[in-house]
Image: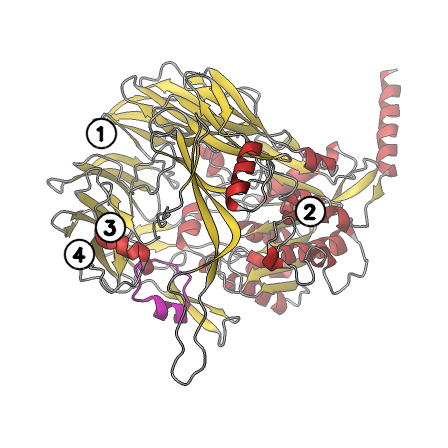
Amino acid sequence: MRIICSVILLLLVTTVFAQQTPVTKANYQQAARFAPRKLSKLIFSTSVDPHWLKKSERFWYTFETTSGRNWYIVDPVKGEKKKLFDNADMAARLTRIVKDPFDAQHLLIDSMRFVRDENWIQFEVKSTADLVKKDTAAPPAKGKGPGTPPAKEKKIFYFEYNINTGELIELSEFKKPKRKPMWANISPDGNIILFGKNFNLYWMDRANYEKALKKEDDSTIVEHAITTDGVEYFSYHSSGGMMGNENNVEKEANKNKRKSAFARWSPDSKHFALIRSDSRKVKDLWVINSLSDPRPTLETYKYQMAGEKEAPEDHLYLFDAVAKTGKEMQVALFKDQNLNIWADVDSASSRDDDWRPSRWLGTNDQLWFTRTGRDLKKVDVCRVDINTGTVKTVIEERFNTYIEMRRIGLVNNGKELIHWSERDGWAHFYLYDENGNLKNQITSGTWHAENILGIDDKKRILYFSGNGREANEDPYYLHAYRVNFDGSGLKLLNPGEFEHAMTINDPNTYFVDNYSRVNTVPKSTLYATDGRKVMDLETADLSSLMSTGFKFPEPFKVKADDGITDIYGVLYKPMDFDSTKKYPVIEYVYPGPQTEAVNKSFGRSMDRTDRLANLGFIVVTVGNRGGHPARSKWYHNYGYGNLRDYGLADKKAAAEQLADRYPWFDVNRVGIHGHSGGGFMSTAAMLVYPEFFKVAVSSAGNHDNSVYNRWWSEQHHGVQEVIGEKDTTFVYNIEKNQDLAKNLKGRLMLAHGDIDNNVHPAGSIRVANALIKANKRFDLLMLPGQRHGFGDMTEYFFWRMADYFTKYLMGDDTERPVDINEINKEIEQGGMKGGAGGRRGPEDY
């Protein structure tokens, strides 16, 4: 009887598989529903961004739904949430003053912040009325006709509002403070403003800074030079870095302008430190912007490629801000070492500060930095004594593969420190004394501790994020935890099988938790750091999105190619999915190894997943051994030394297992797409498994990592340090995609921005050269004037990719018109200037 049932079941399964109808026609209209411009009208707020106040534990935030935007104030101590004001009442009052119509759903309030005793808010409203800008008119030149009329701008109204009494005050004489310019590095006490100029370090006082805020080129501004030995590519400011975005014309025009100086300050403003990198020996790289007007321009920048001996040399300088003198610290130890001064990260990252000083991690008397060897197998955590200039190595990390680092946490002004390490194969925290003696391991086990959220010195409690600890959960889901310094009392603070993003306040008493999965509506909750749930804050409004027929994607788990390792992915179906049909498949890939292209929470970015699926594909994203760092050290370092091929077997194995599960999954029509590292990986897949992967669209790929930057390639693939009698050298070798050009059998489209100064277009062009020499048909799309991201040509690229996959993978032979109508029909025609959904003024008609 059991044999007969099995035979019947086998016949039924075989019949179902045989009845699957292949999908051969693309649904362009359905995919067009997910254009970014349309999504902005379907998806509104998906998280709460708390602006913590300074004088209490309260915070405010805004949240938008299909009904409009509201502003809220939350008092965690009272467990109270209320609106900052009544929208309808505020709209009526603003309409009377501004003379432009507002209603409760359309309040154009901007630049809100709390002021005075934190019971008043200040904000601005832009009107449609014109205002003449001062000092913008030019008188007529002799014999050369009329002068230039004054420029106009929209009048801005400024207000203050008392959230307790409802009093609204128009600030008729208010002068809005100018935003801090990018070049200004302001000391914590606000009295010294550092900046760079002509490769050197300068400073000005507060009074002259106020002049600069009003007029950058005011000739009465007094500037003082701190250094005089700065030269190009061995500079004290930002323009001397490895890579810039200035072409030769812009570089000449900006050479005398103020630049950013990336210094970090002591808390008392008496000292500052910076890393000065000598890149003079690093070789030049170039891109040419053919669209520059009137002539193409050349962009020259320093760029060290993997394996090259000409490396930047980092130098650590400590300056006395009172005497305006500086000296170099003697920190050299490793050949081609990299230095990093730790910053004091403000945990309340969304506060209403006008500016926030860049302070170093440490005290007035000490700062902390790391020193890393070029092969990234040696890392020292070091401390500088400001008074003596002594440099002490406090913690040494050594490993046979590259070492990951996280910011250290200081306890009791540096008497102890909390250090993150993967030394036992998993990421955990360790407690040290100030001399580098290990006191105890704080966390342990086969799970991953991620980042410090906060430290309570008095109670000796560490608050941190981590993942992989909760049983029967996707191991990537991040949570908040607390634990005592001695390792006792470990407690999960925000349970729930979701991806969590936490924002904690300065006193470490409350945190906002934003959480979702790819298949759930995002929610936000307020917790106390003892684990008490204070209140639910918001649930995202996805009603408009759901009205389109949108369906959540489906998380899944399969085995890696070794048959042992669990790997996790997400499967995206078209909205009109029909289980009786058989769908072509596209794997969207990014190999990392610093991350994996697998979403864990709900998000707005749907181009490479949901929108691609809605053409009529099954889109798969899945991890691979050697991918995400938030698992074991073994998992993360699996691809070390085999950076081209290490993830491909798992991508193939995942598709085969999904085909075994689902009759509608067409394993004979598998395509692959990726950008950057994903561009590299998708082309490699076509060449390593040419019989399995049929079509690839590879954008901005670093196909030849010998012409990619040293940092990513040498870290994740590895570089061999050879210590000789007279010198230390580094040997690097990696397989390149063009080495396998002869293997191409399917259809391949390479796409690249022609001024990509991150992944140089040379990577794609070298693959194209090899394919031509191998007599292969392929497609090459160069996007003019685009860098590593495709900017305003992103939408164009999407539809070219859509055409490619629908024609060659789906088999849709529909003749597409020259015009990309899916883009054109979204562009307003005629003279209207207001834009769709915008509020037009009289000048728009």
The N terminus appears in which quarter of the rendering? Answer: top right
Q: Earlier in the sequence, mark 3 or mark 4?
A: 3
Residue at the disc numbered 1: 414
Of pointers 3 and 1, the one earlier in the residue sequence: 3
**In the rendered structure, which disc, 2 or 4, sits on the residue that comes first in sequence?**
4
Residue under pointer 2? 612
Residue range highlighted in magenta: 240-259
User: Which residue type does callout 2 highlight?
Assistant: Leu
N-terminal of the two: label 1 or label 4?
A: 4
Q: Report whether 532 appears left or right of 772.
A: left
Q: Amino acid at mark 4?
A: Ile
N-terminal label among 2 and 3: 3
Q: Main secondary structure of the magenta part?
A: loop
Discs 1/4, front: 4
Q: Position of residue 541 (x, y in %)?
A: 63, 32
3D distance between C-alphas at marks 3 and 4: 12 Å
Residue 359, image quadrant:
top left
Amino acid carrying label 1: it is Gly
Classify residue 468 as left or right of residue 615: left
CB-based contact (under 8 Å), mark 1 and mark 4? no
Front label number (3 vs 4): 3
Where on the picture, by quarter, is residue 726?
A: bottom left
Measured Cα–Cα span from mark 1 to mark 4: 30 Å
Q: Identify the residue position indicated by label 3 in the image.
A: 193
Q: From the image, state whether disc 2 or disc 3 is nearer to you.
A: 3
Between residues 707 and 798, which one lies in front from this camera angle?
A: 798
Q: Secondary structure at mark 1?
A: loop
Q: Quadrant of the C terminus?
A: bottom right
- The answer for how far apart the CA atoms under marks 3 and 1 are is 28 Å
Q: CA distance from mark 2 to mark 3?
A: 49 Å
Mark nearer the viewer, 3 or 1: 3
